[in-house]
Amino acid sequence: MTSITHKSIDLQSVIEAVQSPKCGAIDVFIGTVREQTKGKAVLRLDFEAYEPMAIKEMQKIIDRAHAQWPIEKMTIVHRVGSLAIGEVAVVIAVSTPHRAASFAACQFAIDTLKETVPIWKKEIFEDGEVWVAAHP
Amino acid sequence: MTSITHKSIDLQSVIEAVQSPKCGAIDVFIGTVREQTKGKAVLRLDFEAYEPMAIKEMQKIIDRAHAQWPIEKMTIVHRVGSLAIGEVAVVIAVSTPHRAASFAACQFAIDTLKETVPIWKKEIFEDGEVWVAAHP
Amino acid sequence: MELNIIAFGIAKDILGSSQVQVSLADGKTVGDLLEQLKASYQDFERLASLFVAVNEEYASNETILSATDEVVLIPPVSGG
Amino acid sequence: MELNIIAFGIAKDILGSSQVQVSLADGKTVGDLLEQLKASYQDFERLASLFVAVNEEYASNETILSATDEVVLIPPVSGG
């Protein structure tokens, strides 16, 4: 299950969505908004997504993870819009029978999400704004 | 922060305890009760702990993690008593500026907890019960 | 044909709009479109990467475009 | 000296109690205690491991025991 939301992400419900009596392990990755980047104070982050494609690409990540690890359930939820410092931008949760696979699948998912999913983040500073990773 | 609890673990509050404006990443490991072990149906798990020492040993894990990774906040909570299938036995949450360290520290913590922390788990089956890992 | 091009992130800033119309000869490819856009908007050359999605999938430079395609510019992504 | 030994998990089952009194000569070590317990309760030999905690810390076999120590048997742990 993947989704893009314009509201704050309910961690508890994302975790509950992957709980299963067949599993002994759940790993959850939570990406949050840092107050600074490279030493410079960030006021907020603005996220935008090409939503239908972002949902498809996140589902591809889940499909690829299922092909590599014995996953019971996996969920990716990404928030878009204007996020304040400390707020949650993305949550990835995965349940597996044993723990090594849950860590591996979760790390694979966030690494791949940052490479393939059409979501963009703009850092807003006191004196300007920057689309993250846009330039070499 | 480490604790042993006799009640169900509130995931939301464990995660909130490690959130920080200094961090971009939180990894959370949740250990749950599986319905079977080696193909045999489990009715429930009974956990017991040598509580004061378990709390100290969990704190040592946090201290060792801090020495290895740039951790902002880390929490380990373990439940004891009789747990039903699907219930949460342990939660480890760690926040770091960047994501690689959060995964590494969280995985280190659960691996080490299973080796050093004086907590014992008994699997209760239809036809008997077994202290996990007691025998070679 | 007239193609409607949708842009996100910094690509939107470079175009000055989230959608632009581009005239392209029939049978032209994604590669041709990118070349034409980079000629018109030179800031695209400065990006770390620029991909095109056709109908919600990443498209290769060889993909032939048609007027009914949903064509989206994908500058370097930065979710998470 | 009389030592009060506390046991958890399968060690408690082997002793048949969560606490037992053991008589040990003054100056004896954790290793001596383990030897004496294994002689009295042979099921301890079958465990994957058996450690002793003294005052809430893992103790080596060389640790000298005193009557005021909190001595706890630690069979193979299995938390998580």
Image (spheres, coloured by chain):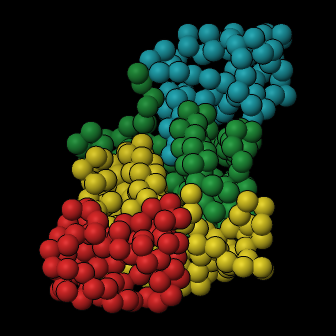
Chain colours: A green, B yellow, C cyan, D red
Pinpoint residue A124: horizontal percent, then vertical percent. 36, 47
Q: In the shown orientation, is residue B86 left or right of residue D80?
A: right
> Residue at 20% across / 72% down in the picture?
D28
Residue C7, compared with residue D3, is above or below; it is above
Give the quarter of the figure containing the N terminus of chain B.
Answer: bottom left
Q: Is residue C30 above or below residue C3?
A: above
The quarter of the displayed image where residue B50 is located: bottom left
**Which quadrant of the figure has residue D75?**
bottom left
Residues A79 and A28: in front is A28
Any part of residue A87 in sight: no
Q: Position of residue D61 (x, y in %)?
A: 26, 62
Q: Residue at x 42, y 42 (%)?
A: B100
- Identify which residue, B81 or A83, lies in the foreground: B81
Where's residue B8, x and y in %? 54, 83
Q: Nearer the viewer, residue A42 or B78?
A: B78
Q: Residue at x 74, y 31 (%)?
A: C57
Q: Establish if D78 lies above or below C19.
A: below
Rendering coords of residue A116 (x, y %): 61, 33
**How many numbered circles are shown?**
0
Q: What residue is rendered at 24% in x and 43% in y?
A: A40
Task: Say if residue D14 shows up in the picture.
Answer: yes
Which quarter shows the C terminus of chain B? bottom right
Left or right relative to B69: residue A49: right
**In this orientation, which residue lies closer to the viewer: B13 or B2?**
B2
- Say above or below: A31 vs D7: above
